[in-house]
């Protein structure tokens, strides 16, 4: 099938009249005649042939109509090819996104399985007791009457297995800073504690946090967080008054 665009050869638009075709041909034939361009006669001879073909087709109403019809069909064919490429691209993109979704979901499932395997219990609540009266658990304390606060975790077993766990405990002051000792310590947590977990336990008691000589808790709304392997597993709030 002839793919040459006769309109482009003559440098005219599709709305060109016969006079336009003749005028464009006259100018180009004069400028591009092989006899006037001996430096590359082969090229100009071929181009001159194309000029003649274009003039012959576009000045013949029947040939011109057939040429225009073929050009329209090629345009439609090109559009269909483009549409198929777009559709194929969308299908490939959809498959890629679906695969990525499966990978993401699989990671979440594995993460949850990993969490369940590592944490053999759930914490229902965090309770605090003043070391001077360790049998009374409260959410409000007088600053002058406390030296240590002892956290107690009420738990539910998830897996029937014994395990040694290292928990990080973070006491948080009302201003959001972590309570540390000494105060200029760079530790991320207040302290760490090793516990021997057994599946028949429903309460885990942790060591207290404070100071023997004087209370260094700050008045206001405080918090305590229990961490395990960079994850919070429990949190409790408590207030300190003067």
Image (cartoon, rainbow, N blue to C red):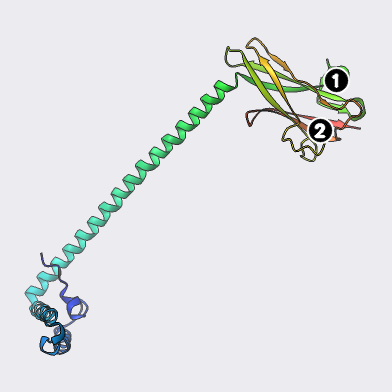
In-front residue for pair 66/52: 52
In-front residue for pair 229/64: 229
Instruction: Name the residue at the top extreme.
Output: 200
- Rendering quarter of residue 146: top right
Please name the residue that numbered disc 2 is placed on: 181
- Rendering quarter of residue 15: bottom left
Crowdedness near tag 2: few (<14), some (14–19) or many (≥20) residues, C-alpha within 10 Å:
some
Place of residue 129 in the rendered image (x, y in percent of width and height, measured from the top left): 82, 21
Q: Secondary structure at mark 2?
A: loop
Place of residue 34 in the rendered image (x, y in percent of width and height, measured from the top left): 11, 86
Tell me how many marks there are. 2
Relative placement, left or right, of 150 versus 99 is: right
Relative placement, left or right, of 214 versus 95 is: right
Q: CA distance from mark 1 to mark 2?
A: 18 Å
Above or below 133: residue 26 = below
Above or below 139: residue 56 = below
Residue pictured at 16% horizontal, 67% vertical: 71
Closer to the N terminus: mark 1 or mark 2?
A: 1
Residue pictured at 31% horizontal, 49% vertical: 89
- Rendering quarter of residue 176: top right
Q: Quadrant of the N terminus?
A: bottom left
Q: Secondary structure at mark 1?
A: helix
Residue pictured at 74% horizontal, 35% vertical: 187
Crowdedness near tag 1: few (<14), some (14–19) or many (≥20) residues, C-alpha within 10 Å:
some
Residue 131 shows which numbered tag? 1
């Amino acid at each position: 099938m002839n793919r040459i665009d006769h309109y482009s050869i003559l440098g005219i638009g599709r709305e060109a009249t016969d006079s336009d075709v003749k005028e464009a041909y006259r100018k180009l034939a004069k400028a591009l005649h092989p006899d006037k361009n001996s430096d590359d006669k082969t090229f100009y001879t071929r181009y001159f042939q194309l000029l003649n073909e274009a003039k012959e087709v576009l000045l013949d109403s029947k040939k011109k109509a057939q040429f225009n019809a073929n050009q329209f069909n090629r345009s439609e064919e090109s559009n269909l090819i483009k549409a198929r490429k777009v559709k194929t691209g969308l299908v490939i993109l959809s498959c890629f996104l679906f695969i990525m979704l499966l990978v993401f979901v699989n990671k979440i499932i594995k993460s949850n399985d990993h969490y369940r395997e590592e944490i053999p219990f759930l914490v229902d609540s965090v309770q605090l007791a003043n070391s001077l009266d360790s049998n009374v658990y409260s959410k409000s304390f007088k600053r002058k009457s406390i030296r240590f606060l002892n956290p107690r975790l009420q738990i539910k077993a998830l897996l029937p297995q014994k395990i040694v766990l290292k928990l990080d405990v973070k006491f948080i002051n009302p201003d959001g800073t972590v309570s540390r000792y000494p105060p200029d310590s760079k530790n991320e947590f207040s302290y760490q504690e090793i516990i021997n977990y057994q599946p028949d336990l429903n309460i885990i008691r942790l060591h207290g946090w404070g100071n023997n000589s004087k209370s260094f808790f700050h008045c206001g709304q405080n918090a305590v967080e229990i961490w395990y392997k960079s994850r919070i597993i429990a949190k409790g709030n408590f207030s300190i008054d003067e």
